[in-house]
């Protein structure tokens, strides 16, 4: 398994590989084009954008002709520096107490997406992309996720020093993490 942090300039070239995995895990966009315009490219243009991918490279036999044939993206995470005036940051400010948002919102690293193909879950891929996307982040970090303590993603975040800051809406919490 190769876990790699990409340069922001490489995001566009990787979109065709990220999209199928995004769609399988989340399935919340009708088309590749709307996903690119409304989410992916917009996020990739933000300050501090970081994209991490996990690629499974099967062991090659001596009869395989091409090194890396059959490799596939199996996980990713991305985030950027969140600012007031952005949709999600403002939503957090409208939903959480002002004392919390004054401390946490604005200039924070926003972990926006983390996805792992179902067949690769429970094998450390989520932890690996999580840790790599946050590697070197020196300030506060925020994310939004469901509030089910049995959800594997929530368990991952809790084990990685994230804590609940408040409720965004019923069933969805905002979590924060201080730098190590």
Image: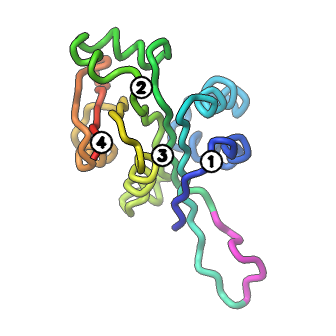
Position of residue 167 in the picture relative to residue 87 (left or right): left
Position of residue 152 in the picture relative to residue 74 (left or right): left
The span shown in magenta is 63-71
78 drawn magenta: no
For marks 3 and 2, the one nearer the N-term is 2
- Separation (CA) of disc 4 from disc 2: 13 Å
- Separation (CA) of disc 3 from disc 4: 22 Å
Residue located beneath label 3 in the image:
115
Q: Secondary structure at mark 1?
A: loop
Q: Residue at x 32, y 31 (%)?
A: 146
| Magenta segment main secondary structure | loop
Q: Secondary structure at mark 2?
A: loop
Q: Secondary structure at mark 3?
A: strand
| Furthest residue in direction bottom, as rendered | 62
Q: Tell me the quarter of the picture where residue 172 sits.
A: top left
For marks 4 and 1, the one nearer the N-term is 1
For marks 2 and 1, the one nearer the N-term is 1
Q: Secondary structure at mark 4?
A: loop
Residue located beneath label 4 in the image:
179
Relative to 94, say whether 57 is above or below. Answer: below
């Amino acid at each position: 398994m190769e876990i790699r942090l990409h340069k922001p300039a490489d995001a566009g070239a990787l979109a065709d590989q990220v999209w199928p995995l995004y769609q399988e895990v989340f399935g919340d966009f009708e088309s590749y084009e709307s996903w690119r315009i409304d989410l992916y490219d917009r996020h990739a243009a933000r300050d501090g954008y970081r994209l991490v991918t996990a690629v499974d490279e099967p062991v090659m036999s001596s009869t395989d002709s091409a090194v890396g044939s059959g490799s596939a993206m199996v996980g990713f995470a991305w985030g950027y520096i969140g600012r007031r005036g952005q949709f999600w940051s403002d939503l957090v400010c409208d939903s959480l107490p002002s004392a919390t948002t004054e401390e946490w919102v604005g200039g924070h690293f926003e972990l926006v997406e983390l996805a792992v193909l179902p067949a690769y879950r429970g094998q450390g891929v989520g932890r690996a992309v999580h840790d790599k996307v946050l590697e070197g982040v020196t300030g506060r970090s925020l994310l939004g996720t469901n509030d089910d303590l049995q959800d594997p993603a929530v368990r991952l975040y809790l084990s990685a020093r994230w804590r609940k800051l408040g409720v965004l809406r019923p069933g969805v919490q905002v979590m924060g993490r201080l730098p190590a």
